[in-house]
């Protein structure tokens, strides 16, 4: 009785091959643009930070099966072009690389804005716009019949539970803003390690770390409507707190631009030195 009252995935539902083709082409086109931008920005500003964002968000693709299992998200299996299977579900090829294309690409955009001295208000607006964009892209994916959220998810729009998307937006912002702050705060080797870890850690926090109230309730036997909507509001509140925290990492007037001179005082004296492309990082060197 307990098993029959829990959500069951639509295992026999075939994937829409046209939709799968659209998602595949879109993912790899976005990934190509992201890689070109990462290369050009890294060379222009003489920093390996974009390369670390690329590597970290590629690795983060392995987080997806865990999120699928907890959030009751199902990629249609018959006719699927499978990358690998885990947790009794199959992961399409395009989904794995979409982590770098989407989280990495938009994360790089947030990094660019932050490094160029965007104000806190600008970053907040970008985060809000990213929230809307994340909803639109997920609705597109579900309407193309490539995947679905099964079970009693609350706040559905065109079949997609929109409570998920604020966490997605926060992932992108945390990668970009975090990378900019890390570049200013750590020595090169430690900074690159931290930026590399941003992708997997941000994805776990944004997908599971703030979504757990809803994930828990959705996976209980026959949850009440009040519990479902209350849990989703709780997850949204956690994501709003996450978003607020991210904006606080950016000063009201923005960080010193990476491509502009910054006057800093030397430790132990009143002598100043001009640091080009350092962003005010004490002891910064080109390349970090």
Image (cartoon, helix red, strand yellow):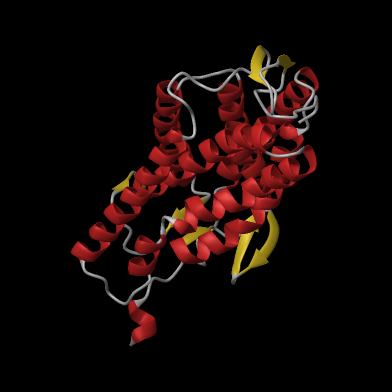
- Judging depth in this view, the residue of 167 and 11 nearest the camera is 167
Q: Nearer the viewer, residue 162 or 41?
A: 41
Residue 69 position within the rendered picture, expressed as x and y whole percent measured from the top left: 51, 66
Which image quadrant for residue 281?
A: top right
In this view, 228 is above or below 121 = below
Residue 155 higher or lower than 252, as above or below? below
Q: So how many labels did they put on this image?
A: 0
Residue drawn at the location 44% of the way across and 21% of the way down: 122
| Residue drawn where x is 46% and y is 67% of the image | 9
Q: Residue 142 or 38: which is nearer the viewer? A: 38
Residue lying farthest bottom? 1
State which quadrant residue 220 falls in. Answer: bottom left
Question: Height in image: 214 above or below 45?
Answer: below
Q: Residue 208 at x, y = what percent?
A: 48, 58
Residue 106's place in the image compared with 100, above or below, is above
> Does the image show residue 91?
yes
Q: Is residue 265 left or right of residue 149?
A: right
Q: Residue furthest left?
A: 226
In which quadrant of the rendered image does the N terminus lie? bottom left
Percent from the top left, x then y, of residue 190? 75, 45
């Amino acid at each position: 009785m307990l098993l029959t009252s829990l959500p069951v995935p639509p295992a026999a539902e075939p994937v829409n091959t046209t939709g799968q083709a659209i998602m595949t082409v879109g993912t790899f086109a976005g990934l190509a643009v992201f890689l070109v931008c990462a290369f050009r920005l890294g060379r222009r500003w003489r920093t390996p930070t974009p390369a670390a964002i690329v590597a970290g968000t590629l690795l983060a693709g392995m987080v997806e099966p865990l999120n699928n299992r907890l959030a009751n998200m199902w990629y249609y299996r018959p006719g699927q072009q499978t990358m690998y299977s885990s947790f009794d579900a199959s992961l399409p090829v395009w989904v794995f690389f979409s982590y770098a294309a989407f989280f990495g690409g938009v994360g790089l955009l947030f990094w660019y804005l932050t490094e160029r001295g965007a104000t806190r208000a600008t970053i907040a607006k970008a985060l809000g716009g990213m929230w809307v964009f994340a909803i639109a892209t997920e609705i597109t994916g579900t309407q193309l019949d490539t995947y679905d959220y099964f079970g009693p998810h609350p706040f559905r729009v065109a079949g997609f539970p929109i409570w998920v998307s604020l966490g997605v937006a926060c992932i992108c912002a945390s990668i970009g803003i975090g990378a900019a702050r890390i570049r200013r705060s750590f020595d090169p080797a430690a900074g690159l390690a931290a930026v590399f870890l941003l992708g997997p850690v941000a994805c776990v926090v944004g997908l599971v770390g703030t979504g757990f109230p809803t994930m828990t309730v959705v996976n209980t036997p026959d949850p009440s409507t009040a519990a479902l909507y209350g849990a989703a509001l709780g997850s949204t509140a956690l994501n709003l707190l996450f978003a607020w925290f991210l904006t606080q990492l950016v000063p009201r007037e923005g960080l010193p631009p990476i491509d502009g001179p910054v006057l800093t005082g030397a430790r132990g004296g009143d002598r100043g030195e001009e640091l080009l492309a350092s962003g005010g990082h004490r002891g910064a060197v080109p390349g970090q």
